[in-house]
Image (spheres, helix red, strand yellow):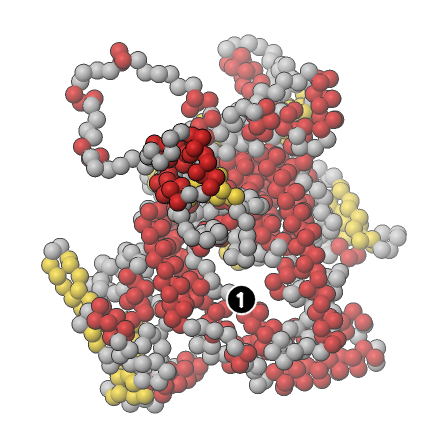
Amino acid sequence: RPFVMKKLVEDGVANNIKSAKKMVDKQRTEVWDALEVVIKEHPVLLNRAPTLHRLGIQAFEPILVEGRALKLHPLVCTAYNADFDGDQMAIHVPLSAEAQAEARILMLSANNLLRPQDGHPVTVPTQDMILGSYYLTMKRIGKAEKGAEHVFVTDPGDTDLPANEIVDGDDFVAAEEKAAAEGGKAPSYKPLLIYRDPSEAVMAYSQGEVGLHAPILVRVTKSFDGVEKSKVIESTVGRIIFNEKIPQDLGYVDRSDPEHAFDHEIGFQVGKKQLGDIIDRCIKIHDFTISAEVLDGIKAMGYKYSTVGAITISIADMTVPEAKKTLISETENKVLAIERQFKRGFITDDERYRLVVSEWEQTTKDVTSALQNCLDTYNPIYMMANSGARGSMNQIRQLAGMRGLMANTSGKTIEIPIKANFREGLSVLEYFISSRGARKGLADTALRTADSGYLTRRMVDVCQDVIIREPDCGTHDGVWAAAIYDKGQLVQSFGTSIHGRFPAVPVCDPQTGEVLFDTDHMLMPADADVLEAHGIERVLIRSVLSCEARTGVCAKCYGINLAIGQPVSSGEAVGVIAAQSIGEPGTQLTMRTFHTGGIAGDDITQGLPRVEELFEARKPKKMAVLAEVSGTVSIEETKKGALFAISVTSEEEGETKVYTVPHSAGILVKNGDHVDKGQELTSGALSPHDVLRIRGIDDDEFGRPGVRTYIIQEVQKVYRQQGVDINDKHIEIIVRQMMRKVKIEESGSTDLLSGSTVDIGELKAANRKIEERIEAGEKGLSKATYTQLLMGITKASLATESFLSAASFQETTKVLTEAAIKGKVDHLVGLKENVIIGKLIPAGTGLSMYRDFKEQTDDTVTDDPAQYVDLSALVGKTNAL
């Protein structure tokens, strides 16, 4: 309003501010003209609640439209978790020049294409856009496709097709499928239609001469060093149109090979995964500006061709497989046989239940594979799921296969399956069984959202003061990064482990000693290939876990800022980003239980409490026993009979440790086995406190994970099961905060109190002073000794140095009374304490290093012409502001 009123007075439409205000209130036509001028190049902030991560508030350049609804770019909906069913959003107008600059440079949606949690693109085309791109890049031979009714066979392969003859397209496809099923050599063909250039092919399509998916030959002309060359390539009209919007240097085609120099970059069918990869490569090779244009192009094409394709769903598309009846009746007979065995006393009730459940699970899988085989590749439902636009095979199974087994309210699988599907309709009993799943899904959504939000709040609180404070702390300590395997399966590649990290010490070739990467080189996934070629499988990298910055962390130990793909700059509030990165998918996952309608299996209900258990450093329910000494095992029955006594006798010291465990514990060792210290004796999850006490902080000499690695890997396991990628560094920040306190055992010559709990930085500083005094020649001095503590995030938040931050978190009265008794001083280091007292937060430009710079005086300017900067390159270029 103030801007519009000022503009009205400036233009002479209104005589003074008062009359301008009246005009605005009456909404005269002149007001809209003034508004249109005012909002030009003035960014506004859009926010959607709940703001779970920093992408929940972004800047846009507004355009006036008719109507009362906000029109939002569809690609930012993923970041906002928004949909078009009446979501509300708040608009904020940045007023000052600084606020506008910040909105335009840092918060503009076109500059926020990457997710801070894993560095992958967040603006990936979804739903209609995927379906349109999938439809556009399809290839189809047969009578259903104009221009592909016949093909010329060049090589019949292992089929009965005649060589060098024109055959019917449908016959060719049938022969190709038969050869593939028998594992024989596939036939090859040549299209019959040829066009002189791509534009002629597109024109032929618009005239109805050729279909969008028919294979065609087209001549492509390119210029090499000023010389024009051309070649005939195979493509489809759809792929020609799709490639117009895609940069032709994304690395899908080897351009150095003359055979492929003319090929289209995208010569394959595009689905959700492929689109994500295209955008990923585009951002890596080109900048955000070009990537934003490519995204807009894909969006427009996707919407246009999903409309042109007219892919709709009818009940007839849900084809129920023929084999279903046979499979179900076979299983029913097997279940009757199992029942007979139980009645005759051959098996227990537990075994009967297990066998029945496994039989029905297998049948559900068999019906699903039968369904997959009978679905046509061009079936709209199949296309929708296969492209990744919406739905999954799991949901198609429920539509046209069989719904399968359901879980009851306690999570136990009900042995009566739902044999029907939604196409056929459920019986009353089946409807009753399935209603539980539906209810559980909705109840879970309500309850788990609150749990997840509370976990996020605790995480934000524990690491809100972790800010990048300095460029380099100078440490040569770090953590080992290597490929991660779980039960022999690769779960994280070497390249992912080192992505965006700095080596703690120079990485040298083991044979020649040549330095491959110095400590100021930021490692990227491509560098993993170089390291593996030199036989290096693990690297010591800088990590926030070993950062020696007194407050916050340093930029070198943190590494890459995943949201922009560049090294992190000072002032970045990496602690809050870490908490949001872990918390946001947690909320998403909890809300995702009802999509499969409570089908028997795991959902995040198991996952989220596990993450909480790890971050709160609680003892797990079914806890594994760790050997405290290395030695020989002997297992005996105890007098009670219900328990086993596992004894481990050390060979060197003769020390014996005895552990009593129940029969159900799942013992992993046998009588007479040799075990190492820290080895698991029974199955189950480990207690982080036991891991710290027995194995220590870092990985032990047997390569077993120490407490830091254990917590990181276990949290990652939960998210990986749900298909969520989170970079290790976010979890490392939380673990660093959990382990920042130590208990002083012997204070030595320091001023610290024995038995007190202090910050690890304070202890290191005190010990460093003693070291300096010893080096200076003082005698009889000793350093303080300590025990590392592991605190849960709630306890760590309350143990923070800042009483304002702790009081605003929990137990306010207790925190404030303690602070008053101890006469505590709050140094206002973190974000919360500054927000509470209304001071500028010490992040971004609020960091003291950006505010306290000295003004340069004129006498330092020299008249040496070499000192002048050549600005000619900038002529005609406008500043971002």
Q: In the current view of this chain or complex, which residue is farthest to the right?
A: 639
Compared across the picture, whether 233 is left or right of 499 comes to left
Quarter occupied by the N terminus:
top left
Quarter occupied by the C terminus:
top left
Residue 569 x, y percent position in the rendering = 42, 33
**What residue sits 58% from the left and 20% below the top?**
827
Query: Which quadrant of the structure image shows residue 676?
Result: top right
Compared across the picture, whether 708 is left or right of 259 comes to right
Residue 504 x, y percent position in the rendering = 44, 35
Compared across the picture, whether 513 is left or right of 50 comes to left
Judge whether 822 appears above or below 197 on screen: above
Q: Secondary structure at mark 1?
A: loop
Whether residue 750 is visible, yes or no, is yes
Query: Around disc 1, counting alpha carbons within 10 Å, would you say few (fewer than 14), some (14 to 19), or many (20 or more)?
Result: some
**What residue sits 56% from the left and 15% below the top?**
770
Residue 260 x, y percent position in the rendering = 24, 64
- Which amino acid type is shown beneath numbered disc 1? Gly
**What residue sits 26% from the left and 37% below the top?**
878
Judge whether 127 appears above or below 163 on screen: above
Judge whether 171 appears above or below 342 on screen: below
**What residue sits 75% from the left and 60% below the top?**
410
Q: Which residue is mark 1?
A: 391
Q: In the current view of this chain or complex, which residue is farthest to the left?
A: 227
Residue 133 x, y percent position in the rendering = 38, 65
Report the front residue among 54 and 731: 54
Whether residue 535 is visible, yes or no, is no
Report the front residue among 430 and 631: 430
